């Protein structure tokens, strides 16, 4: 554990220096440091209402993996260095689930190929979570049976209201297997009234052939490429994933855009020096048409602290990253979406204006 600590004076100082609301600075800190709490679980999810705000935000943070200034007491009150800052509701253990809703239940994430089995990236915490995804969804019948059970359990009649199904899951044997799986999932969902967008989060779709197949067989498709970081990619990531260098990343996003897909990427804030981060997001800007998802690096295990570059051990790094992102997308239509990023750098404001958005 690092001995870096942050005080309320420091929060106030950063908030003033960068014109970021105190509440947002605290919530960024909460993501970065996690929580100290008297429980066995290493990671929890909850809704949070900060003092002085009516909004309810959703968080998934690590527990007892860093000497955090945040603590939670038996009444579910959140303290920062002993000072009450918010109240927590609906606390639950964070597991690697098979499926869950977002965006007021109009978006659904499907982990249909057991992500908890995936290993190999040094900063990843998925395989440290308790698996709750060991369900075989390798063919139409299995997905169909799963959906019947899922709808019943959630008391949902059909899937007509769903705007997007995101497949975020473990790696497939190859690209062909993956795209066939996506089309199969879409076909089964259609039987339940679904008629909107399939989105894939990952890095296994790369070729024109795969994209042609998706274009032909899906009405709407989005590709969210898991870029994660710009430097030391070979050291940090699974071999297949790291095999995509910056030119490769641009090539995949470019092809996806030319196929008429929505494109963006996922990135973990804390793994690159800020000048590299800035350069990388500027280079990728022409290749995306949706806001990328910038997630604060979290310590799923104590050792993850060492994955951060030295500068990213300090809270100021994340506030600076927030300013870099705001400047990069100034004057564009692109905006972050709270409900698709629970480890965000943005809460009550974005580009110095009130930031209203569905949160969960
Ligand atoms: S590919 Fe890497 S980051 Fe993604 S789930 Fe597997 S180990 Fe984690």
Image: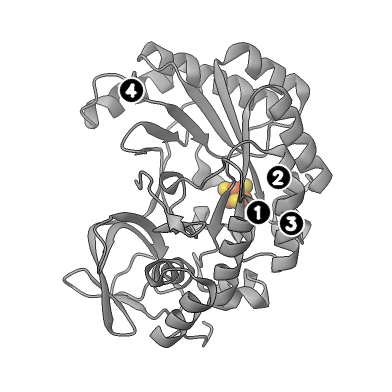
Number of the front mark, 3 or 2? 2
Residue drawn at (25%, 68%), measured in percent from left and top?
52
**Residue 230, numbered label:** 3
Q: CA distance from mark 4 to mark 1?
A: 34 Å
Looking at the image, tell me whether mark 4 or mark 1 is earlier in sequence order: 4
Name which of mark 4 and mark 3 comes first in the sequence. 4
Please give the residue where the numbered disc 4 appears in the rendered image: 161
Whether the residues at callouts 2 and 1 have beta carbons within 8 Å, the answer is: yes
Q: Which residue is mark 1?
A: 328
The reply to whether residue 67 is visible in this rendering is no
- Distance of mark 2 from mark 1, alpha carbons? 8 Å
Q: Is residue 257 visible?
A: yes
- Nearer to us of marks 3 and 1 is 1
Question: Judging from the image, what secondary structure is the residue with disc 2 in?
Answer: helix
Residue at 41 percent across and 38 percent down: it is 98
- Mark 1 sits near ligand 1, with its Cβ under 8 Å away: no
Q: Nearer the viewer, mark 4 or mark 2?
A: 2
Q: Earlier in the sequence, mark 3 or mark 1?
A: 3
Which residue corresponds to mark 2? Answer: 285
Question: Residue 72's x, y, as percent?
Answer: 27, 73
**Residues packed near mark 1 inside 10 Å, few (<14), some (14 to 19) or many (20 plus):** some
Label 2 vs 1, first from the N-terminus: 2
139, above or below 24, in the image: above
Q: Position of residue 209 (x, y in %)?
A: 75, 19
Looking at the image, do the residues carrying marks 4 and 1 touch, with CB atoms under 8 Å apart?
no
Quarter of the image for residue 250 reads top right
Q: Is residue 181 above or below residue 353?
A: above
Q: Earlier in the sequence, mark 3 or mark 2?
A: 3
As helix, strand or loop, the secondary structure at mark 1 comes to helix
């Amino acid at each position: 554990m690092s001995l870096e600590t942050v005080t309320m004076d420091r929060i106030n100082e950063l908030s003033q220096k960068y014109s970021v609301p105190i509440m947002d600075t605290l919530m960024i800190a909460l993501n970065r440091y996690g929580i100290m709490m008297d429980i066995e679980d290493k990671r929890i999810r909850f809704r949070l209402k900060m003092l002085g705000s009516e909004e309810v935000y959703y968080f998934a943070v690590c527990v007892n993996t860093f000497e955090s200034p945040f603590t939670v007491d038996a009444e579910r009150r959140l303290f920062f260095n002993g000072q009450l800052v918010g109240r927590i509701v609906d606390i639950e253990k964070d597991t690697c689930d098979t499926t869950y809703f977002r965006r007021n239940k109009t978006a659904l994430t499907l982990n249909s190929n057991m992500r908890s089995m995936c290993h190999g990236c040094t900063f990843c915490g998925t395989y440290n979570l308790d698996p709750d995804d060991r369900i075989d969804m390798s063919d139409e019948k299995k997905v169909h049976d799963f959906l019947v059970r899922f709808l019943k359990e959630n008391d949902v009649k059909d899937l007509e209201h769903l705007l997007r199904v995101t497949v975020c899951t473990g790696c497939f044997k190859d690209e062909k297997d993956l795209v066939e799986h996506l089309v199969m999932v879409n076909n089964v969902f259609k039987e339940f009234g679904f008629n909107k967008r399939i989105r894939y989060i990952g890095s296994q779709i790369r070729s024109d052939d795969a994209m042609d197949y998706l274009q032909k067989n899906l009405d709407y498709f989005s590709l969210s490429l898991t870029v994660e970081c710009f430097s030391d990619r070979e050291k940090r990531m699974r071999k297949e994933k790291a095999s995509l260098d910056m030119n490769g990343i641009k090539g995949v996003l470019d092809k996806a855009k030319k196929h008429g897909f929505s494109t963006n990427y996922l990135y973990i804030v804390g793994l690159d020096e800020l000048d590299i981060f800035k350069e990388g997001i500027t280079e990728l800007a022409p290749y995306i048409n949706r806001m990328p998802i910038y997630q604060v690096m979290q310590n799923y295990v104590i050792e993850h602290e060492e994955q951060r570059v030295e500068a990213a051990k300090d809270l100021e790094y994340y506030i600076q990253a927030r300013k870099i992102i705001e400047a990069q997308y100034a004057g564009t239509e692109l905006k972050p979406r709270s409900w698709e990023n629970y480890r965000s750098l943005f809460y009550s404001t974005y580009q110095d204006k009130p930031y209203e958005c569905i949160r969960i």
